[in-house]
Image (cartoon, rainbow, N blue to C red):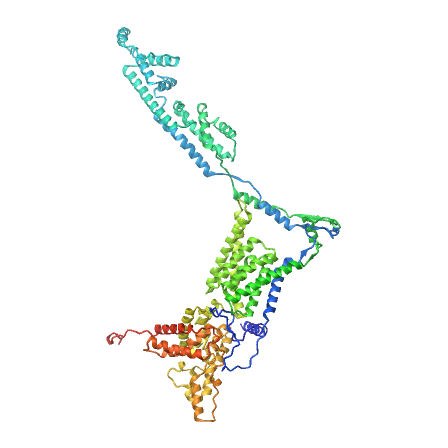
Amino acid sequence: MKSLQALSKRVDQWWRMYITNAPEQRQPGYKASSSSEPTPRTDVTHPTQKVRGKKTAQKIPPTAFFVIAVASVTSSFGYRFYSTPQLRPGTLAPETISAPRTEKVIDEKETENRRKQIRTGSYTVLKINLELNEELKQTLQSLLAPGTSLRRQTGELPYVDESLLPLETQRYLRQLSDSQWQQITEVLKTFPLDETREQESEEASEVNDSVPDPQYPLVLNPQLQGAIAQLQSLKEESSASEWAQVLFTISEARNNYEFALHELQTQQQGNSNPLYTPALFDWSETTWEETKRGMERSLDRILTQGLAEGLPERQLRQAIALQVQDRVPPETQKFASDTLHTVLKGQHNLIHDKDAANRLAEKAAEAFPDIEYQVHEDEIIVHKGETISEKQFVLIDHFELSQRQINWEGLTAYALLISGSVTLFWWVERRVHSGIRQRDRILILLLTLTSPLLVSLKFPAIALSGIGLLLGGFYGSTVATTVVSLIAAVLPIGMDVIWNQWLASAAGGILAGIMAGRMRSREEAALLGMGVGMTQSVAYLAVTLIQTAIPGIAWQPLLTRAAFQGLGGLASSIAALGLSPYLEHLFDLVTPVRLAEISNPNRPLLQRLASEAPGTFQHTLFVSTLAEAATRTLGGNCELVRAGTLYHDIGKMHDPLGFIENQMGGPNKHDEIQDPWKSAEIIKKHVSEGLVLAKQYRLPKAVRAFIPEHQGSMLIAFFYYQAKQMAEADPNVRVNEADFRYPGPIPQSRETGIVMLADSCEAALRSLKEATYEEALAMVNKILRARWQDNQLVDSGLKREEMSVIADTFVRVWQQFNHKRIAYPKGALPK
């Protein structure tokens, strides 16, 4: 700890001697005012301010610093301009160049290009579309379902025992028209049933006499004659009841067939290529079940073998015919082929497997060997006057024969670009952060110069995001995003970068710069680091996908690289968290996070103040409340005001009883001294002692500035008028007003000016008990007017019209502290 304190002290002395561009009491490292007015000069001295001899800090002139910044950035960013080969591809060789030694030379650039071509090349890997397979199987089932339903409506075949009627006859009888079947039945009535021959002859004669001639003559054909003969034979062999049952069964089968046939015709109406025909009803149940099973197996085989996109129609039909040939009964093969063709027409279940193709491409790229060129000693690489090729350049450059030298034209143009970028930064800085010091510019420059170093070390993922986190936390979002954007734009011109990594880092850096200025704790910084990492991962994925511009990409290696990019963003936040405390101390920076830590009441110095000077500590808390409220109303830096107010009176610990708030009703020390000059010195000493304590506890200068500036060069009026009374009584006593004024300086920022006003009004407001708002406001306005007329606020940046706003805020806070309480009746009080 002592070594760190000594290092910090030496760095502080070095800054003050050579770099600092403002007096010691200048507000450092934090924008002190939100006013649009120019920052007031810091060398203005109050007319009555006693100026002691003080060495003027030296500084680097702005022009010299501008030149240093441009030169350093150009020299670190413009790497490619320092070593430009004169003998490059496409130029003519001024002389014959030979290899100085035997060696194998690896062409890294061409090797990487070849691997990139392999990665983005066309690799075809097919896979079966299982979802489409299931859809096609469902389609087949949906086509077969109507056939099964129609066959169920016709009933079973045979509908009569085949021993009585052959199957073909049963099929034929179902299909006859009603008129044909009626004529057949009339003919069958002429045949006798099972009686005696004589009786049959007599009855037959009688029947023949009674049977009328049919209205339509029966036209006989061989098939019809055969059916009649078989029915006559069946009638002769059957009893009357058996024959009646046969006729009923045939009639029922005919009705079912007619209904199913009508249903089939209705379904197929309008279909130019129907799948089902009346032949559907002629197939036996066994044939139909074998057909369905054979079609399902055939479809499964075809889908397993795969259907490629663009398969010719002829080949598809041939494939289907080969599959159903041995799996479907012969009479249903045509139906099976037509149905499967309907299912598979225009379909292809072989699809491209992009992931597998990309994995194959990545594997092929990784397996691609380095491109090597074997050259022997004194072997001619290029002849004089020959145009240098890419391969020849690789060999020439490897042997350092490419005559590399500085490209002065390009370097000059690049320096002009850097000059414009630095000028743009300077303009932004002046508009949004007018209180920035030269040491802050040097820190920004140093952080900027780390980016090419990290790129050279192959760590671009943490370059811009780390800079954004640090600068955003130190100087706010605008400065951080400006620096990150300028680096992201100009560095790739002077150095070779991997674009997807660089753009991802730029996205993370801009996000970090925007959000870092809003952090108020280390926990928020850690969460921001996670957000930066996620942003860089997503940005890397997006840029890579845009760059490749191919239908598929190897997701596994891409996601792995994106994850590493995200880890780089997270690592940048870890590095920023680790570096920020050191940078804050070495460069005397105040950040919201550091101010929040300093304002912790458990800090040793504040605990000492509460213990050794409790009255002062209570006074400090009330002043802090007043000042914070006014600062928040005016849009100032509340964190800085809170921290500065808590420490503004720490010097009173050198003699707590010398200040009335710590006397607790005891004797007044100054009554015993009875020397206003000594009393004034005791009072003024709390400023100098406070500065000593502040340096001892390594408070930043922005917080230290509150100690002298909250008193400014105000007059210690009580002892000054006491001294004047003594001078009136004794003519030998001379009173110098400067002896009774604080040494200053007067407030140099809006924040310290507000604390001066709050400190002046605190005691007066505490003394008010039953005053109205108007009375309290009048008193506060009187105090503020006195400070204004005493020229204590001329350098603070506060405006005259803001005095009324500050006064109103003070009084309203006082009202909240001084609210009335309910008077409890005597019986309600505890005994």
Residue 408 in the image: state x and y as whole percent: 66, 59
Q: Nearer the viewer, residue 196 or 594?
A: 594
Residue 451 in the image: state x and y as whole percent: 57, 60
Residue 285 in the image: state x and y as whole percent: 39, 25
Q: Residue furthest left?
A: 827
In the rendered image of this protein, does residue 387 appear above or below residue 714? above
Q: How many marks?
A: 0
Residue 95 in the image: state x and y as whole percent: 75, 52
Q: Nearer the viewer, residue 798 or 658?
A: 798
Q: What is the quadrant of the C terminus in the image?
A: bottom left
In the rendered image of this protein, does residue 456 appear above or below residue 13? above
Q: Evaluate whether residue 751 shows in this view.
A: yes
- Position of 445 with respect to 284 (left or right) is right
Q: Nearer the viewer, residue 631 or 376?
A: 631
Residue for point 50% across, 53% down: 538
The quadrant where residue 83 appears: bottom right
